Amino acid sequence: MKNSINNFSEIGTLKKVLMHRPGDEFLNLTPNTLERLLFDDIPYLKIAQQEHDAYTNALRAEGVEVVYIVDLAAEAIESGGRTVRRKFLEQFIAEAGVTSPKVVKHCFEYLNSFKDTRDMVRKCIAGIDISELKKLGSISGFYATRDTGRMIIDPIPNILFQRDPMATVGHGATLHRMWSVTRTRESIFMEYVYKYHPFYNDTKLYYDRSEPYCIEGGDIEVLSSEVVAIGISQRTEPDAIANFARRLFKDKSNNFKYVLAIDIPDERSFMHLDTVMTQVDVDKFAVQDAIMDISTVYEISAGRGGEIEIVEIHQSLQKILEKYLHLNRVELIKCGNGRRIDAEREQWSDGVNLLCIRPGVVVAYDRNFVTNEALRKHGVKVIEVPSSELSRGRGGSHCMSMALVREDL
């Protein structure tokens, strides 16, 4: 076991993080496809890339190694040779919803024509429109009558948010069945990393994307070496949490004792747990005011015979965090400093969706200046990054990143 993953908290010094630099998938967004592709607006790619580079450069300046999903996926596919490359493309095209044998053949030939595997992976993410196949002279007749702007394979713009397709817990990981068909293909890339990448192919999985219940990484927060919090949300189902907990507790290589399932409202502003609560220091959390009214939390622990025990808890969020983190007091720092208008505006641009680099140091969007100032008044160092275009995707620094290695507290 290489222990290529080490993540026992949300705040331990971050050493290695997985991200995706936005690419041509943004260029294949149109007003007519935004709703289907779960995007609110069309970011300007050039500026979005500059902002993302500013974010990753800020991480590197703090000693964090940044790795990209395109690179890991390409390395995994290359390590398996032609057989794995073919298997990947066939699976990807099938999961993209292409069913016509003729179109499947054309898509496969087109994607396989990319000699550089990284370019092939980028093209999978960007999507394929019919005009690209026409340029190759590979289609005629029926296809020539179709709209040249029609996407044969949709882009995957939400892959920007590497928090969701998988999550790291302890020395293991979860690979996710995504809630929306639009996002299903996002977790294919890490599936191949966990199967074929020489550095990650022995990673223990506590959940697999082939399972019937949906779960997404934005709902999973590792609070300590004993406690994992998971949001019961629109995108994460209770049965998925139960299956995850069973496997986590069976793994004796860790010391996890509890999974706290937090029932959050099925609302856009509560998309995932990390959109309303992230840890920023040993005893501090940034929160959206509404989550403080959450009344239903379930303590899941190991039972007999490999089963789990579930107990409903009726305490305030603050009291629950203090109890399970063994702290005398936890500070809850409110989005917008508690002022309703500021909170609603800055929550729209993920004011409390923060990546903690080490205890008391976070990365935040510069546009959320009220929340950022509130954090500073509570002793938190805030590293601001530009966000005019990245924020259009409705995800903050926490959403865009997945910690692979953190130092233990």
Image (tube, rainbow, N blue to C red):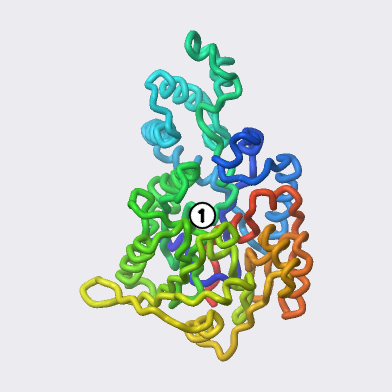
Q: Is residue 204 visible?
A: yes
The C terminus, quarter of image? bottom right
Q: Nearer the viewer, residue 200 or 33?
A: 33
Q: Is residue 34 above or below residue 12?
A: above
For the point 55% across and 32% down, the residue is 127
Instruction: Say which quarter of the image contains residue 130.
Output: top right
For the point 56% across and 36% down, the residue is 155
Q: Is residue 317 above or below residue 186?
A: below
Label 1: few (<14), some (14–19) or many (≥20) C-alpha neighbours in 10 Å: many
Q: Which residue appears farthest toward the bottom when viewing the image?
A: 328
Across and down, in percent, residue 246 comes to 31, 68
Across and down, in percent, residue 327 comes to 54, 88
Q: What residue does disc 1 label?
A: 164
Give the left or right position of residue 275, taking residue 51 as reference: left
Q: Is residue 109 above or below residue 212?
A: above
Give the left or right position of residue 58, taking residue 291 as reference: right
Across and down, in percent, residue 78 comes to 46, 37
The N terminus, quarter of image? bottom left
Q: Nearer the viewer, residue 174 or 296?
A: 296
